């Protein structure tokens, strides 16, 4: 397995809905023929979806890729890596992605909520990995980076998710004290 | 009040069944919405929404035109006036996603630089990443200073972003000179408390130092002793250690192996697994060395996490290929995994068991597989089939069990690739064990009785035609084959007719019945079937053994690509002469079916299309045809199957030679590589000297740069008398050498002539002989006649076994072994080797050798061909 050691360990991350339709996808290695064009990517997503929609078993090998996944209600979360990649590491990426999205959606991980908070979801995907390199794997850190202080901004100009997050935080504070 | 408005909004939208703003986005309308960015005061929420829409739309695969992208980009840059953090971060994201030309990107550079150096921590990291994504190397100098500072920023997000972006600056991963000056900063980041910063710093440090072996080993020895907190960084260190061990296998690497073993006791599972996997994959480790890794993996097998089980069984599967006995202790755990709900894990478990299983456990395993096969998808079934194939070769005595298993699998449901894999396995088993031939062929016969795949049916019919007549009861196959003529589509019917004719040609006693059947085929509704039947009928009725052999048993062996190109040439250059089929190059005999146990078992992806592949011979012929100087040499007769090394790969200049034979000439093709980074060679050619050869010319390679292969040719005249052909040449590499800078590749203007002596090149008769496959050697042998024969007796003292003698003779003559006579049975003391070939000029020649082994190999060689001198030459040349 004479791979040159590199930090680029993630081939792609992807969220599909329960029809296998793309919600958000990021592919980091477009030199790879499987992911070269959007058409190729969607073909691969179709294949992945077919292999995972019925069986809920966390990991599957497809062609020369290892795919780890998690599903909830009407969504599927995937992380792809080379078949020689450390499967546990890919899983930790998946968990980071899922947990941080779950946090901002207050455990209400479903398609509608994703679309209502598309901006945060996009920012989270961007915080998890940069062009194939794992940036951060701690969900709390990721959420903190995406949701910054909001007090300076007038309430009417805040996003829904920000407001709800603030409320949530204040509740937490109340219950703690 | 505003707050309640919003939450009302949210609630009502949920009640209404959510109008998803992202559903069916229209490109033009989204781009129209960018007008919101011009409003004063800015509606932050709306702007964020529009930016999200743009990103979402690009992500869905919508292509933006150049002007569209440009306009969108300029519109978004107006948003830099807002102070909202989320909006700013979305803005950074959009800038990364939009396909912007570098010239336009400059507009955003100064704003981004301000963001990256500003006080607001919320978006400094994203600003760095966006900026590095859009700037090209030329503009980098402007931000160099800030980037360098950011590497050691107190905020881990900023530091990570700077490290990762620096790493990504060059697409090919090699660091720029600028980065090489930053080792102090990178080193400081390496000592950071933050785990991710440390991981990124380690990756960047390695990419800077990776070509410096000493620096890498220093880095390793420093951090393998401790100080790395991040599990990811530890995994990375493990990979670097493996790379070092692989690269310098001579040196003592025990401290690195100790490090890997130490990692097996790490607290993080990621690291434990990485270390176990690394140990298992290292070359040259004994079974004892990997035992601790295997026992760690064994523990993982019973983990509740599917990923952990998958990872462990996948690695063990690989280990089982090389060290089956080491994995045997996990067999009990593996058998539990057969019922795992994750079918990938189950398949890997079963194939691992197949590898480690002993002869006694096969029957039990097969039963387990049978119950399990119906539940898994096709690609996993194929993996299992391949594993069974491996098992058949390992335990030839058990082939009946496996054969019956395979035939049950053939009858089950499954797609084309799955069926094809089974058929190929059965064919491979038949080839390897002559004992299994009858059962195997009958299983295949039953399969084609109900086979929806025409390609497979024709393939099997072809095999039946070749092998069926040689079995003890050929008549049994006729019914199956004739059924195809009645029931199938034209392609299969035609193949069945050919197959029938072969039975008629080889089995004299069946011929009258076959003739009756062929006559019936003449009433077929399809042209091709009727044509074939008529042709075979008339050939068989003629009763001329030579004709029958030539046109039915040994079919056309010309290379299809070669035939096509020559026919095109013939049509373009009209002559009165008829087309000469003997001038067509012959296809090299089909490559032996080799079992490659090294293939990755989970590699279930689509195979490369097998049919239109060109052979090496055809590829070389095409390459040569591009050189105008060789155009008039005539058709290429043969190229040597393997290149001959004239210097070793580690030497200054690595040279390989391929010999091409033409009717009256010979072309020596030299593939050369310059392994010196500080030299550039020009006008490179190889001068050869051989006793009876005239050198007619050279085509030199104009330039040979470091590590870029180049080719030069030497043209020779072939001696008239074939007996003069075997010869040893002395070879010298001649060139003009120029010193050059290893880094830039810039060469000095002045150079000097130099030469380099290569190893001698020895040519034998084999460059004049092409392999030809004779299905029925005995018939061809008889046909050639005893009067055209020469014989000679030899004693080979240097060869220590019959198999060795067979291999040497086969490569010496360059002819095709027939009727599997290239394999000597175990413990045999005598053997008959049958070789068939075609000599230059289209002369068929056959060689038969009988050899006896009693400490040395004694053998008698007979050669038959229509040309007496050739026979003498063939037998006397050894």
Image (tube, coloured by chain):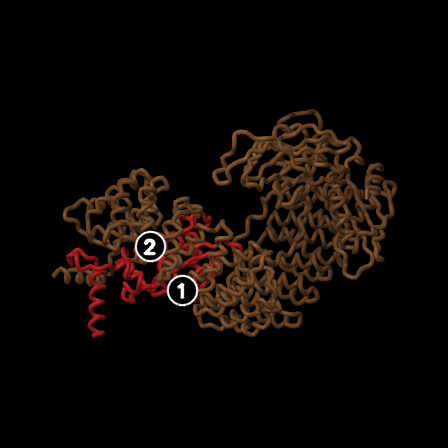
User: Relative to the observer, which residue lies in front, B11 or B274?
Assistant: B274
Q: Position of residue B25 (x, y in %)?
A: 28, 49
* Residue picked out by circle 1: B229
Q: In the image, B171: left or right of B472? A: left
Question: In the image shown, does A20 or B59 lie closer to the viewer?
Answer: B59
At mark 1, the secondary structure is loop
Query: Would you place residue B753 above or below residue B852 in this image?
Result: above
Query: Does residue B334 appear in the picture of this structure?
Result: yes
Q: Residue at x 37, y 62 (%)?
A: B195
Going by the image, does A152 lie left or right of A27?
Answer: left
- Dividing the picture into quadrants, the one containing residue B192 is bottom left
Q: Which chain comes out red in the rendered image?
A: A
Position of the C terminus of chain B, as image quadrant, is top right
Q: Residues within 10 Å of mark 1 (few under 14, many from 20)?
A: some
Precedes in sequence: disc 1 or disc 2: 2
Question: Please, which chain is the residue tagged with disc 1 on?
Answer: B
Which hue belongs to chain B? brown
Residue B90 place in picture, x, y as percent: 27, 52
Residue at the outermost left position: B1
Mark 2 — residue? B152
Counting the numbered discs, the total is: 2
Point out residue B639 in the picture as x, y percentages from the top left corner: 68, 39
Tell me, yes or no, if residue B626 can be seen here: no
Within-10-Å neighbours for mark 2: few <14, some 14–19, many 20+: many
């Amino acid at each position: 397995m004479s791979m040159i050691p590199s930090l680029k360990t993630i081939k792609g991350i992807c969220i599909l809905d329960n029809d296998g339709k793309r919600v958000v996808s990021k592919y980091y290695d477009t030199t790879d023929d499987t992911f070269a064009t959007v058409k190729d990517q969607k073909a691969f997503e179709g294949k992945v979806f077919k292999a995972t929609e019925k069986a809920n078993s966390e990991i599957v090998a497809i062609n020369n890729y290892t795919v780890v996944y998690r599903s909830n209600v009407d969504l599927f979360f995937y992380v792809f890596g080379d078949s020689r990649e450390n499967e546990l590491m890919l899983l930790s990426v998946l968990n980071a992605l899922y947990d941080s999205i779950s946090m901002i959606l207050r455990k209400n991980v479903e398609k509608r909520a994703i679309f209502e908070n598309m901006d945060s979801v996009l920012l989270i995907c961007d915080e998890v990995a940069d062009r194939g390199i794992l940036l951060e794997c701690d969900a709390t850190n990721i959420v903190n980076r995406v949701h910054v202080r909001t007090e300076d901004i007038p309430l009417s100009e805040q996003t829904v998710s920000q407001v709800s997050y603030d409320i949530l935080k204040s509740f937490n504070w109340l219950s703690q004290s | 009040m505003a707050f309640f408005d919003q939450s009302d909004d949210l609630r009502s939208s949920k009640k209404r069944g959510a109008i998803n703003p992202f559903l069916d986005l229209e490109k033009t309308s989204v781009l129209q919405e960018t007008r919101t960015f011009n409003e004063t005061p800015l509606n932050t929420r709306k702007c964020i929404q529009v930016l999200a829409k743009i990103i979402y739309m690009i992500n869905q695969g919508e292509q933006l035109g150049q002007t569209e992208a440009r306009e969108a980009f300029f519109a978004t840059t107006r948003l830099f006036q807002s102070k909202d953090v989320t909006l700013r971060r979305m803005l950074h994201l959009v800038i990364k996603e939009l396909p912007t030309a570098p010239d336009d990107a400059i507009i955003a550079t100064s704003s981004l630089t301000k963001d990256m150096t500003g006080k607001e921590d919320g978006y400094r990291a994203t600003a760095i990443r966006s900026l590095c994504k859009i700037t090209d190397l030329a503009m980098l100098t402007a931000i160099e200073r800030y980037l360098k500072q950011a590497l050691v920023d107190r905020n881990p997000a900023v530091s990570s972003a700077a490290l990762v972006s620096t790493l990504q600056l060059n697409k090919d991963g090699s660091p720029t000179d600028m980065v090489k000056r930053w080792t102090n900063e990178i080193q400081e980041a390496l000592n950071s408390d933050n785990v991710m910063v440390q991981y990124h710093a380690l990756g960047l440090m390695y990419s800077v130092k990776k070509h410096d072996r000493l620096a890498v080993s220093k880095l390793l020895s420093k951090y393998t002793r401790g100080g790395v907190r991040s599990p990811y960084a530890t995994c990375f260190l493990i990979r670097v250690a493996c790379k070092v061990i692989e690269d310098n296998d001579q040196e003592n690497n025990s401290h690195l192996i100790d490090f890997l073993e130490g990692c097996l006791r790490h607290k993080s599972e990621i690291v434990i697994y990485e270390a176990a996997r690394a140990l298992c994959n290292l070359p040259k480790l004994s079974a004892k060395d990997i035992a601790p890794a295997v026992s760690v993996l064994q523990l993982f097998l019973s983990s509740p996490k599917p990923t952990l089980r998958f990872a462990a069984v996948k690695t063990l599967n690989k280990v089982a290929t090389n060290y089956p006995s080491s994995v045997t202790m996990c067999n009990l755990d593996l058998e539990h995994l057969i019922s795992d709900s994750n079918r990938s894990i189950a398949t890997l478990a079963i194939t691992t068991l197949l590898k480690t299983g002993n002869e006694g456990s096969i029957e039990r395993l097969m039963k387990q597989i049978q119950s399990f096969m119906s539940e898994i998808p096709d690609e996993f079934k194929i993996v299992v089939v391949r594993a069974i194939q491996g098992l058949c070769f390992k335990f030839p005595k058990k082939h009946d069990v496996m054969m019956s298993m395979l035939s049950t699998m053939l009858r089950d449901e499954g797609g084309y690739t799955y069926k094809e894999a089974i058929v190929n396995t059965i064919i491979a088993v038949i080839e390897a064990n002559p004992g299994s031939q009858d059962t195997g062929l009958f299983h295949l016969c039953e399969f084609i009785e109900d086979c929806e795949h025409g390609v497979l049916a024709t393939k099997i019919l072809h095999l039946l035609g070749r092998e069926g007549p040689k079995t003890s009861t050929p008549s049994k196959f006729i019914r199956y084959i004739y059924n195809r003529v009645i029931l199938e589509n034209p392609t299969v019917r035609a193949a069945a007719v050919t197959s029938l004719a072969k039975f008629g040609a080889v089995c004299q006693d069946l011929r009258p019945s076959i003739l009756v059947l062929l006559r019936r085929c003449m009433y077929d509704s399809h042209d091709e079937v009727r044509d074939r039947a008529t042709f075979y009928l008339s050939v068989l009725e003629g009763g001329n053994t030579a004709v029958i052999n030539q046109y039915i048993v040994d079919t056309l062996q010309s290379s299809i690509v070669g035939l096509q190109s020559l026919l095109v040439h013939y049509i373009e250059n009209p002559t009165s002469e008829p087309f000469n089929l003997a001038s067509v190059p012959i296809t090299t005999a089909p490559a032996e079916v080799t079992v490659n146990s090294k293939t990755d078992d989970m590699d279930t992806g689509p195979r490369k299309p097998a049919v239109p592949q060109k052979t090496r011979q055809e590829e070389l012929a095409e390459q040569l045809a591009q050189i105008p100087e060789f155009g008039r040499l005539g058709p290429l007769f043969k190229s040597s199957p393997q290149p001959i090394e004239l210097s070793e790969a580690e030497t200054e200049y690595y040279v390989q030679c391929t010999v091409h034979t033409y009717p009256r000439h010979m072309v020596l093709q030299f593939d050369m590589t310059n392994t010196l980074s500080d030299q550039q060679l020009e006008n490179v050619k190889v001068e050869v000297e051989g006793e009876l050869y005239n050198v007619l010319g050279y085509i030199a390679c104009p330039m040979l740069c470091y590590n870029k292969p180049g080719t030069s040719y030497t043209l020779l005249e072939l001696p008239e008398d074939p007996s003069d052909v075997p010869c040893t040449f002395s070879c010298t590499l001649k060139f003009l050498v120029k010193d050059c800078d290893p880094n830039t590749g810039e060469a000095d203007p002045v150079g000097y002539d130099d030469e380099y002596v290569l190893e001698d090149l020895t040519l034998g008769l084999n460059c004049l002989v092409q392999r030809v496959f004779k299905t029925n050697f005995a018939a061809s042998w008889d046909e050639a006649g005893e009067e055209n024969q020469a014989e000679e007796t030899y004693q080979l003292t240097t060869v220590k076994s019959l198999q060795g003698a067979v291999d040497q003779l086969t490569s010496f003559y360059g002819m095709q072994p027939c009727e599997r006579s290239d394999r000597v049975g175990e413990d045999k003391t005598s053997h008959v080797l049958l070789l068939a070939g075609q000599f230059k000029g289209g002369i068929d020649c056959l060689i038969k050798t009988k050899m006896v082994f009693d400490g040395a190999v004694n053998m008698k060689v007979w050669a038959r061909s229509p040309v007496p001198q050739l026979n003498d030459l063939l037998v006397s040349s050894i």
